[in-house]
Image (cartoon, grey):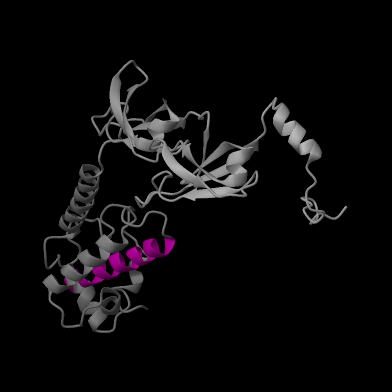
Amino acid sequence: MDDPYKILGVSKTASDAEIRKAYRKLAKALHPDAKPGDKAAEERFKRVSQAFNTLSDKEKRAEYDAGGAAGFGGMGGMGGMGGRPGAGGPFNHRQSRGGRNFEGMGDIFSDLFTDFGAQQQQQQRRAPPPRGSDIRQAVRVDFMDAARGGKHRVTLPGGRSMDVSVPPGAMDGQVLRLRGQGDASLQGGQAGDALIEIKVATHKYFRREHETVHLELPVSLKEATLGAKVRVPTIDGAVDVRVPAGSTSGSLLRLRGKGFAGSNGKRGDQMVRLLVALPEQDDELRDFLATWHPSSEDDPRKGMKF
């Protein structure tokens, strides 16, 4: 036979109030409403209720203290747990033999269920109503506008229009989240968000790779051979760039800080790839090349093996 004092965690000299307090604490923690589906907690809850049933009855407690088995073992596992009226179980409001020392189990379970109800109401109060749905819309942005940033007018689903701030360095496919600009909540919660996807148009001359801007720049044979200062377009406007003498097609020039702004605010570079352009019709150049004999070692394909 298990010791009801040990089950409740009280001493054999515990007062009625101490027994009641110990039981109430355990019952709240183990009750099926607090631990739904927990079979172990349910079994322990039954044992705790059985122990309290014994110790809360004067005669049953006296019998157990005197060494008798009827006070605890004769309960039949949980005799009164939803069984026949007057069985002395923990839900019995009537006094058993000799009467209870205190108010009875009904008061404890009334408090217990009140606590569970209050907890559920508190959880319901804490849970905010569902928010509205997010909406998606795309905005087409010019390449240069994506580089510099600026305001753009967007018409959302439903016909509502608003200005959207596109940040400098915006990337194709980047999504801007506008808090509270989505659908309203039908239950009174917060409105959803508007998700604006940026679609960056291609440029006639520039190409972007992360924060780097690429540009192919045609130069004449004379500029490439003798070197020259030429005007080069950038996203900030045209600048003067020195083409080194002896440049060939494919030579790269780096313009530092002329690229797109990165996430850290630092700008990338612009890479200029030179393309030597020959004139379509230049008789003088053709006649010169016909009589020109370059050095035998000046073979542009000498590094190739085939």
Tell me: 265 left or right of 203.
left
Residue depicted at 29% across the width and 65% down the height: 49
Q: Is residue 145 magenta?
A: no
* Nearest to the observer: residue 184 or residue 121: 184
Residue depicted at 24% across the width and 47% down the height: 123
Residue 108 is situated, as x and y percent measured from the top left of the image, at 18, 58
User: Is residue 8 in sight in this rendering?
Assistant: yes
Q: Toward which corner of the image does residue 43 lie, by quadrant?
A: bottom left
Q: Which residues are magenta?
A: 39-58
- Secondary structure that dominates the magenta span: helix
Q: Is residue 45 magenta?
A: yes
Residue 8 is situated, as x and y percent measured from the top left of the image, at 26, 74
Residue 269 is situated, as x and y percent measured from the top left of the image, at 45, 48
Tell me: 281 left or right of 183.
right
Residue 40 is situated, as x and y percent measured from the top left of the image, at 42, 65
* Nearest to the observer: residue 225 or residue 74: 225
The relative height of residue 127 versus residue 35 in the rendered view (above or below) is above
Q: Toward which corner of the image does residue 88 lie, by quadrant?
A: bottom left
User: Is residue 88 in sight in this rendering?
Assistant: no
